[in-house]
Amino acid sequence: MDISDAERRLLREIQRDASLSLAQLTERCGMAQSTVWRRLQDFEASGLIRGRVALLDPGRAGCKLTVLASISLTNHAEQTVAAFARLIDGHPEIVECLVTSGGADYQLKIRVADVEAYETFMSQVLLRSAHVREVHSSFVLKELKSTTELPI
């Protein structure tokens, strides 16, 4: 998809604050209001804009601990992968799941209240799955950067 410089400005602005009004976006991007509205509709229809959300502070929302878990499956059969995908979908503590190369099959980003909550989650959910062979966990001590903005 070819995106003009003006459209890039528009996309950067809504990445920073999706609650901006059309008038505010018009002012910040130097585009006509009808153009801004039309481009946003086009971006949503094409799937470039997947949704608009409110970003919560994890600590204030009771999810202070971030864990990065490397997961290895017992095998790579279609049924195993599908069952693992269902497991991932069924647990809101898992906020990201990435298929990776290297030693592990998946990297999970998990947000929970504390170490005790993670221990319960790991032992009751991850390690009880017949499809999970290994879990290696790393606890995030400090976030130096966390953004949802793409570098466009």
Image (spheres, helix red, strand yellow):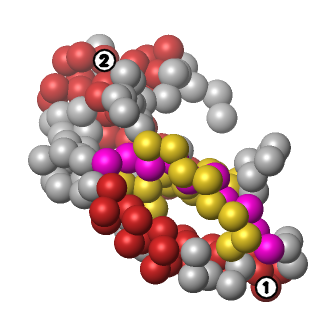
Position of 62 relative to 37 (above/below) = below
- Count of numbered tags: 2
Q: Which mark is residue 29?
A: 2
Q: Residue 54 location in percent, x, y?
A: 23, 48
Mark 1 lies on a secondary structure that is: helix
Category of crowding for the residue at label 1, using alpha-carbon neighbours closer than 10 angstroms: few (below 14), some (14–19), many (at least 20): few
| Helix, strand or loop for the magenta stretch, by majority | strand
Category of crowding for the residue at label 2, using alpha-carbon neighbours closer than 10 angstroms: few (below 14), some (14–19), many (at least 20): many
Position of 46 relative to 33 (above/below) = below
Q: Residue 146 location in percent, x, y?
A: 38, 30
Tell which tag, 2 or 1, sits nearer the viewer. Answer: 1
User: For this rendering, which residue is in front, 127 or 88?
Assistant: 127
Residue 110 lies in the magenta-colored region: no
Task: Examine the image and state in which quarter residue 141 appears.
Answer: top left
Q: Which residue is mark 1?
A: 79
Amino acid, disc 2: Cys
User: For this rendering, which residue is in front, 141 or 75?
Assistant: 141
Mark 2 lies on a secondary structure that is: helix
Task: Examine the image and state in which quarter residue 118 appears.
Answer: bottom left
Residue drawn at x 18%, y 34% as measured from the top left: 20
Mark 2 → mark 1, Cα distance in angstroms: 48 Å
- Of the 4 image quadrants, the one containing the N terminus is top right
Residue 66 lies in the magenta-colored region: yes
Position of 6 relative to 80 (above/below) = above
Is residue 69 visible from the viewing direction of this image?
A: yes
**Magenta segment range?**
65-74
- Considering only order in the chain, which callout, 1 or 2, is on the residue closer to the N terminus? 2
Q: Which mark is residue 118?
A: none
Amino acid, disc 1: Gln
